[in-house]
Image (cartoon, rainbow, N blue to C red):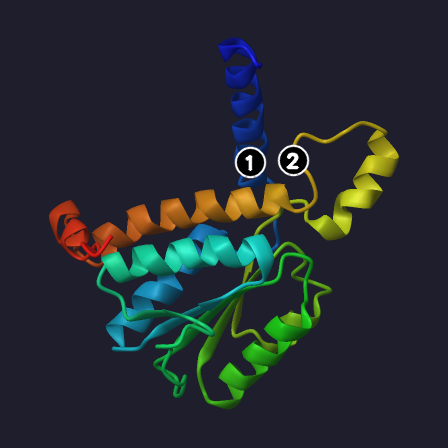
Amino acid sequence: MASPHSMSSLASEICKQISSIFSKPSLHPPVLDVLVKEISSAVARNGRVFLYGVGREGLMLKALCMRLFHLGVSAHFVFDMTTPPIHGPEDLLIASAGPGGFSTVDALCSIARSNGARVLLLTARPETGSCVKHASVVGHVAAQTMADDEESEAVNESRPLLLMGSAYEGALFVLFEMAVYRLGDELKQSPELIRNRHTNLE
């Protein structure tokens, strides 16, 4: 069984690795600013926010979708039974493709753009990914993904603390918490209002 000290050390190292992602240089605007601006702009034009990602990226986006709903945003996760159609420039699709592209994400971004909606693509590979061509705007999350994992292991020859795409997925979680905090101010949502939208059917 791990001692409290070793658990604390592991937790600190994971948090340090994720924190360092947000200080890496990028040719793109800060991803937090991009995310907050796109969501608040969609709300201002009375639009809806749609979210999608595959695998663990998708779980992070589901968590964001839940918090956006708590903030009073009309937020919908793609493929839920109650997700409405996307149409018009007032709507926003936020999609994640850490390695740059997935066939499902490519298709959904293409459909959203063809229906006139804005598309915010979150990715670790903003220059080379297949999804970028469908994006209205790109949010660069400069983290290691599963696509980089084998290369990194070959160079370092050691077992990484954050396996496969965990660095990217952890960065998404932290990014979304920062965005929710900022959006609370932008959308003038008090903690009481946010709590009142949480389900009581649990």
> Residue at the location (68% across, 67% down)?
101
Q: Amino acid at mark 2?
A: Leu
Q: Is residue 103 above or below residue 24?
A: below
- Residue 167, image quadrant: top right
The answer to whether any part of residue 140 appears in the image is no
The disc at residue 163 is none
> Residue at the location (31% across, 55% down)?
67
> Residue at the location (72% across, 31% down)?
160
* Mark closest to the chain's N terminus, 2 or 1: 1
> Residue at the location (52% across, 24% down)?
11
Q: Secondary structure at mark 1?
A: helix
**In the foreground, 173 or 134:** 173
Taking the image as shown, residue 8 lies to the left or right of residue 127, namely left
Q: Amino acid at mark 1?
A: Ile
Outermost residue on the front side: it is 202
In the rendered image, residue 44, in percent from the top left (x then y), is placed at 25, 72
The reply to whether callout 2 and callout 1 are in contact (CB within 8 Å) is: yes
In the rendered image, residue 154, in percent from the top left (x then y), is placed at 87, 37
Taking the image as shown, residue 129 lies to the left or right of residue 51, namely right
Q: For label 2, count other residues whose C-alpha is less than 10 Å away and answer few (under 14), some (14-19) or many (20+).
A: some
Q: How many numbered marks appear?
A: 2
> Disc 2 designates what residue?
162
Q: For label 1, count other residues whose C-alpha is less than 10 Å away and answer few (under 14), some (14-19) or many (20+).
A: many
Q: Secondary structure at mark 2?
A: loop
The answer to whether any part of residue 95 appears in the image is yes
Q: Which quadrant: the N terminus?
A: top right
> Disc 1 designates what residue?
18
